[in-house]
Image (tube, grey):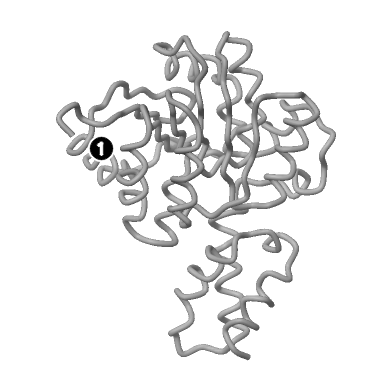
């Protein structure tokens, strides 16, 4: 089988059927040069795709639409642990913004279902979630339309950087980018891509907020990995406005340095 046929075979499985082709191709390339059979390439690619995209997602979410937001947030591992702290997190990040805010949630997962927490805390938010798993995009858009929120979700790979930048630039300032627990997944596909992504979008936005887990989601044990590469990169190149930990998740809020 040629590579196109192998990629088609990989995406025939329902859980991968709505992933951007670019992401699938990038992951497949990691195994394509190995001296292994086609079936092994398919298996290894699916395993890594599952680790990157499906690890946090309950299969129940992919097929259900008419559930309340809290149910969805609890079913997705990444948002489940954030659920009790959403109000505190958003108030701390957005404390200096009194006007309409354009928020771009890159690698959103189901984080769009937290939109009510913006409203509850008095923030006027236009929300755009960018997500690679098509089923989650459909789920969020169904919720946004039903609730008549000023929000939308876009099915797009974060490796399509020019398209991501165009989406951001279409909206007025202030523009804020969320990268909640997203960078580790990007690094699995392409090393140091996170640095490129941050560097290229920051000139167009007022703030970027990155987060990463500090405790394992199941056992709630602290991680030995501290992600010094990311923290040092941000410290060396940008102005950090806030750095806090809540609910087993560390958030770093930063912007361009004034002299840049």
**Spot occupied by residue 111 in the image (x, y as percentages of width and height):** 60, 33
Give neighbour class at mark 1: few <14, some 14-19, many 20+ (Cα, 10 Å): many
For residue 222, side relative to residue 260 (left or right): right
Taking the spot 63% from the left edge, 84% from the top edge, the residue there is 39
Q: How many marks?
A: 1
For residue 230, side relative to residue 189 (left or right): left
* Image quadrant assignment for residue 123: top right
Of residue 24 and residue 185, the one placed in the foreground of this image is 24
**Spot occupied by residue 66 in the image (x, y as percentages of width and height):** 84, 34
- When the figure is inspected, residue 115 is found, relative to residue 60, above or below; the finding is above
Taking the spot 39% from the left edge, 29% from the top edge, the residue there is 251
Of residue 136 and residue 126, the one placed in the foreground of this image is 126
**Spot occupied by residue 183 in the image (x, y as percentages of width and height):** 42, 47
Q: Residue under circle 1?
A: 234
**Spot occupied by residue 209 in the image (x, y as percentages of width and height):** 40, 31
* Image quadrant assignment for residue 244: top left
For residue 117, side relative to residue 181 (left or right): right
Of residue 23 and residue 145, the one placed in the foreground of this image is 145
- When the figure is inspected, residue 189 is found, relative to residue 123, above or below; the finding is below
Quarter of the image for the N terminus: give it: bottom right
Quarter of the image for the C terminus: give it: top left
Please tell me whether mark 1 sits on a helix, a strand or a loop: helix
Residue reaching furthest right? 66
* Image quadrant assignment for residue 48: bottom right
Taking the spot 32% from the left edge, 21% from the top edge, the residue there is 242
């Amino acid at each position: 089988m040629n590579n196109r046929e192998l990629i088609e075979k990989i995406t025939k499985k329902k859980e991968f059927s709505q992933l951007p082709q670019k992401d699938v191709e990038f992951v497949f390339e990691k195994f394509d040069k190995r001296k292994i059979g086609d079936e092994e390439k398919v298996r290894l690619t699916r395993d890594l795709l599952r680790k990157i995209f499906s690890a946090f997602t309950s299969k129940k979410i992919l097929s259900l639409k008419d559930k309340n937001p809290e149910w969805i947030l609890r079913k997705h591992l990444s948002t489940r642990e954030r659920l009790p702290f959403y109000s505190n997190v958003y108030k701390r990040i957005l404390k200096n913004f009194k006007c309409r805010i354009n928020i771009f949630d890159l690698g959103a997962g189901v984080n769009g279902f937290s939109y009510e927490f913006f409203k509850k805390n008095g923030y006027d938010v236009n929300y755009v979630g960018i997500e690679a798993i098509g089923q989650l995009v459909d789920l969020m858009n169904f919720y946004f339309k039903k609730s008549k929120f000023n929000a939308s979700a876009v099915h797009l790979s974060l490796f399509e950087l020019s398209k991501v930048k165009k989406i951001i630039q279409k909206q007025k300032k202030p523009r804020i980018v969320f990268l909640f627990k997203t960078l580790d997944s990007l690094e699995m596909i392409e090393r140091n891509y996170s640095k490129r992504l941050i560097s290229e979008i920051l000139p167009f936005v007022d703030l970027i907020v990155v987060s990463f887990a500090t405790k394992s989601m199941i056992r709630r044990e602290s991680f030995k990995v501290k992600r010094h590469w990311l923290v040092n990169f941000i410290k060396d190149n940008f102005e950090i406005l806030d750095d806090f930990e809540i609910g087993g998740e560390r958030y770093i809020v930063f912007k361009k340095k004034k002299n840049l």
